[in-house]
Amino acid sequence: MSRLSRFLIVVAEDNRDDALLIQRSLRQAGISQPINVLEDGDATIRYLAGEGIYADRYRYPLPDLLLLDLKLPRKDGFEVLGWLRAQAGLHRLVVTVLTGSREQTDVQRAYELGANSYLVKPVGLRAITRLGESLCQYWVNTNEGPSLG
């Protein structure tokens, strides 16, 4: 079984069109596991904490990679990242910020809060497809990720 077929990704993205494009690009790159999409920061924290409807870890397993938008409703991506890095069982989860912001203050803050990578969302289907392929090539095929336990 290849790593691609076992690799779990959660996408925290409030823009449904962007979320669909991201999912499509990851599927084209070979990700076969379900890709859970969360539309706000509160839901992202509940998912990662395994609370409420997300308590069933069979249906909602912890991901190998969290793709995190910064401009989420309720709790923004910075708040999610700060919360995540304070959790003993989750603080090593690999997080790639995937956002529309090129603001240097956002880049700096994301890394200060523990982001593993910061990517600006590309424009256009072809660019998004290449991004999905690059994400899979690096995070799935090249990188050796930490265990969360």
Image: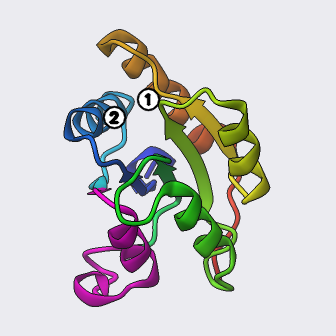
Q: Secondary structure at mark 1?
A: helix
Can you say whether 30 is above or below 71 in the image?
above
> Relative to 68, does residue 82 appear above or below in the rendering?
below
Locate residue 21, reporting x and y percent: 27, 30
Q: Nearer the viewer, residue 78 or 117?
A: 78
Callout 1 touching callout 2 (CB < 8 Å): yes
Badge number at residue 132 = 1
Q: Quadrant of residue 78?
A: bottom right
Residue under pointer 2: 22
Q: Please give left or right for residue 128 compared with residue 21 in the image.
A: right
Q: Which residues are magenta?
A: 37-61
Q: Residue at x 28, y 40 (%)?
A: 19
* Number of the front mark, 1 or 2: 2
Can residue 141 be seen in this snapshot?
yes
Numbered circle sitting on residue 145:
none
State left or right for residue 83 relative to residue 111. left
Q: Does 39 appear in magenta? A: yes
Q: Is residue 148 above or below residue 112?
A: below
Q: Amino acid at mark 1?
A: Gly
- Would residue 137 be visible to someone looking at this image? no
Q: Residue at x 52, y 60 (%)?
A: 64
Q: Is residue 96 magenta?
A: no
> For the C terminus, which image quadrant?
bottom right
Q: CA distance from mark 1 to mark 2?
A: 7 Å
Give the mark nearer the N terminus: 1 vs 2: 2
Q: Position of residue 83 (x, y in %)?
A: 59, 74
Q: Nearer the viewer, residue 32 or 79?
A: 79
Residue 130: quadrant of the picture: top left
Asked which secondary structure carries label 2, the reply is helix
In front here: 54 or 142? 54
